[in-house]
Amino acid sequence: MTKSQSERPQQVERHERRVEVCFSPQQFELYKADFHTCVVIDVLRATSAICAGLANGVERIIPVPTVEEARELQAQGCLAAAERNGQIVEGFDFGNSPRAYMDGELAGKTMALTTTNGTKAIAMAKDMPQVAIGSINNLDAICTWLIHQPGHVLLLCSGWKDKFNLEDTICAGAIADRLIDISRFRSEEDSTIAAKHLFLAVRGNIFSFLKASSHRRRLRDLNMSEDIKYCLTPNTVNVVPVLHEGALVDSRMVSKTLQSSEIVG
């Protein structure tokens, strides 16, 4: 056997898994059948807030697509957060500011959360075999975790009201670039190529590049510049939220639960 022949199977194995980017929830139905893991991304601000909450001790976050569902859980005694169009919904103590989720008093608590875009995307993806949460804040953690998961990966950008947005696409491009560069992943879709090249073009100055983006302007007009700075800062947390029994929890807690079940079994 020649050297080139012996290398061919290794080349196939090296690219055995796919990672692709879906620009908005409106396109989700076109992708979902081919993928095992769906990573939902809403950089400004839902998935950043979820990561911040779990990293600071919140035990479970129950994502719901509607304000009415959040109110029902609130009436049952659950802490509840609701955001629409960047602002806290009347009657709720929290919106989706990640800085609000860093309060030590929330440690060990369960929260319900509904947002304009992120929780809607999570609800769409909930029947996938595995759903995880990605953000710029947990970039290293989500990439490392994905490398050790089975199957193909879909990066679902929450966008803004089903429309494309820049920050989610850049985050998805960063994850795709990392997985393709260091692991056994390939991509086939133009959306992934576009997201990856957008990230590579702006990675040295993401904050300035997004200065004119629609949602950053929207939040800036609501005096939320500190949230923007936090959400666009890489690797502030080392947590991967995953959807488990209807709630988002730290992936490490799911692993411990499964290990305990195996020992008992």
Image (cartoon, rainbow, N blue to C red):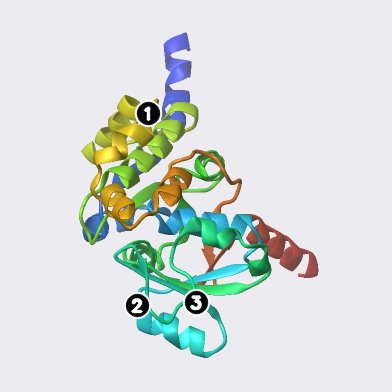
Residue picked out by circle 2: 66
Mark found first going from the N terminus, 1 or 3: 3
Quarter of the view holding residue 123: bottom left
Q: How many marks?
A: 3
Disc 1 to disc 2, how far (Cα)?
Answer: 35 Å
Q: Nearer the viewer, mark 1 or mark 2?
A: 1
Instruction: Spot the residue most to the right.
Output: 264
- Name the kind of residue labelled 2 in the image: Thr
Q: Please tell me in which quadrant of the rendered image residue 21 appears.
A: top left
* Residue at x 73% of width, y 60% of height: 259
Tag 3 residue: 80
**Disc 2, SS:** loop
Of all residues, the one furthest to the top in this rendering is 2
- Mark 3 residue element: strand
Mark 1 or mark 2, earlier in chain:
2
Check disc 1 and report the residue beneath it.
Answer: 205
Label 1: state its secondary structure. Answer: loop
**Neighbour class for label 1 at 10 Å: few (<14), some, many (≥20)?**
few
The outermost residue toward the bottom is 75
Residue 112: which numbered mark, if any? Answer: none
> The disc labelled 1 sits on which kind of residue?
Asn
- Provide residue 120's location: percent of width, then percent of height: 34, 67
In the displayed structure image, the side of residue 40 where residue 237 appears, left or right: right
Residue in the picture at 40% in, 32% down: 177
